[in-house]
Every structure is written in structure tokens, then in C-alpha cells.
Image: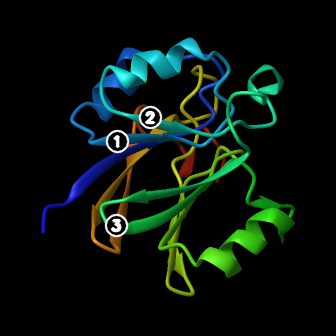
């Protein structure tokens, strides 16, 4: 069985840099987990591979063209794509229903700007982090899923180098 390489990004906020495009090159499909910012960047991504996207809270002008969450089937795997998954420790009700009803192999989401690549109750929880404009104290990233049937593995691809350490063992982001 052949495996699929699925590029994953979120929270682009209107920017799609050359480093992002390079990291996603070679993908068989691309998932965008919301806060797109500029619909034209989806066309750029489509030059690499087919794109499935959902809107985020920063995409009010796109809600008539893209859903808030979407069931995606790729290479024998069920992937639930959404922007909001966890709101201050509480699972968004519609996502909780989808997780219970559809039982996806992976949940891909954005919004928090924090990378997550972990399994919980047999489901890969995957947040590729923040791929938007460079900002002090924020390290940009995208992700890759390797899908082979229902088996899914996630990998974070860092776009920015790790912040340099300061004296005393602190880096630019704190302890």
C-alpha cells in the first residue's frame, strides 16, 4: 500500500512565504485549518496539490465558501479538519459531536498557534502551529501527515530556526 504525504498548515493570516511553499512541495494533498486571511493563497497552494480548507475566526469574508469543519477521507484514513478544537480546555461542541459520531483517525486543527502532535484515544491530534507573518517570539511551522490506510503519523516542519539561548539557560521566549 502506498503512503500519501499530506501538507498541513493553519493560521497563515494572509501570508504564504517561499519557505512555506518549499516545505509543502511534494505533498499529495494539502489541508488548511483556517485563518486563511487571503483566499488567493489557496490558489498558490493548489499549484502544489489539491487543497481542502476550513475557515477560522479571522475569515469572516470566506464563510460562504468554506465550512467551519470538514470530514476528509484520504488514502483510507478519516481526518476531521477544523479551526477551533479546544476553547480554554473545553472541546467545541460541534467538534465533540463529530469526534463521537465519525470517529476519525486524525483531528487536524489550528487557532492556538501552538504545535500539537499526540495521540488520544486512538486519534492523532495534530496542530501544525502558526504559518503566518514572522513575529518576535513566535516560531513559524507547518506539518506533514504520512497516511497509509488508517495509519497516520504526524511531523512538525519548522520554518524558523530555534531561538538562540541567552545566558542563564533562557531563550528569547523565556525559560
Q: How many numbered markers are drawn?
A: 3
Q: Is residue 158 left or right of residue 175?
A: left
Q: Which mark is residue 153?
A: 3
* Percent position of residue 163, x then y: 48, 37
Crowd band around label 3 with a 10 angstrom C-alpha radius: few (<14), some (14–19), many (20+): some
Q: Residue at x 69, y 28 (%)?
A: 65
Residue 96 on image: x %, y %: 76, 72
Residue 111 in the image: x percent, y percent? 71, 45
Q: How far separated are the C-alphas under marks 1 and 3?
A: 15 Å
Res 16 seen here: no
* Front tag of 2 and 3: 2
Whether residue 15 is visible here, answered yes or no, is yes
Quadrant assignment, res 40: top right
Quick one: quadrant of the N terminus?
A: bottom left
Residue contact at pointers 2 and 1, CB within 8 angstroms: yes
Tell me the element at label 1: strand
Give the mark nearest the N terminus, 2 or 3. Answer: 2
Q: Is residue 167 above or below residue 92?
A: above
Q: Using the rendered view, name the quadrant where residue 157 is placed.
A: top left
Amino acid at each position: 500500500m502506498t503512503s500519501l504525504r499530506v501538507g498541513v498548515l493553519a493560521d497563515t493570516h494572509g501570508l504564504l512565504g517561499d519557505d512555506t511553499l518549499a516545505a509543502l512541495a511534494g505533498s499529495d494533498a494539502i489541508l488548511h485549518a483556517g485563518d486563511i486571511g487571503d483566499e488567493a493563497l489557496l490558489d498558490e497552494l493548489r499549484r502544489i496539490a489539491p487543497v481542502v480548507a476550513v475557515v477560522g475566526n479571522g475569515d469572516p469574508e470566506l464563510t460562504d465558501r468554506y465550512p467551519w469543519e470538514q470530514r476528509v477521507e484520504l488514502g483510507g484514513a478519516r481526518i476531521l479538519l477544523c479551526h477551533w478544537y479546544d476553547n480554554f480546555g473545553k472541546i467545541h461542541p460541534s467538534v465533540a459531536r463529530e469526534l463521537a459520531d465519525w470517529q476519525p483517525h486524525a483531528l487536524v486543527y489550528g487557532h492556538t498557534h501552538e504545535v500539537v502532535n499526540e495521540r488520544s484515544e486512538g486519534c492523532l491530534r495534530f496542530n501544525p502551529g502558526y504559518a503566518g507573518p514572522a513575529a518576535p517570539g513566535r516560531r513559524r511551522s507547518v506539518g506533514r501527515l504520512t497516511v497509509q490506510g488508517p495509519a497516520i503519523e504526524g511531523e512538525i516542519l519548522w520554518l524558523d530556526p530555534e531561538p538562540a539561548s541567552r545566558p542563564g539557560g533562557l531563550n528569547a521566549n523565556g525559560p
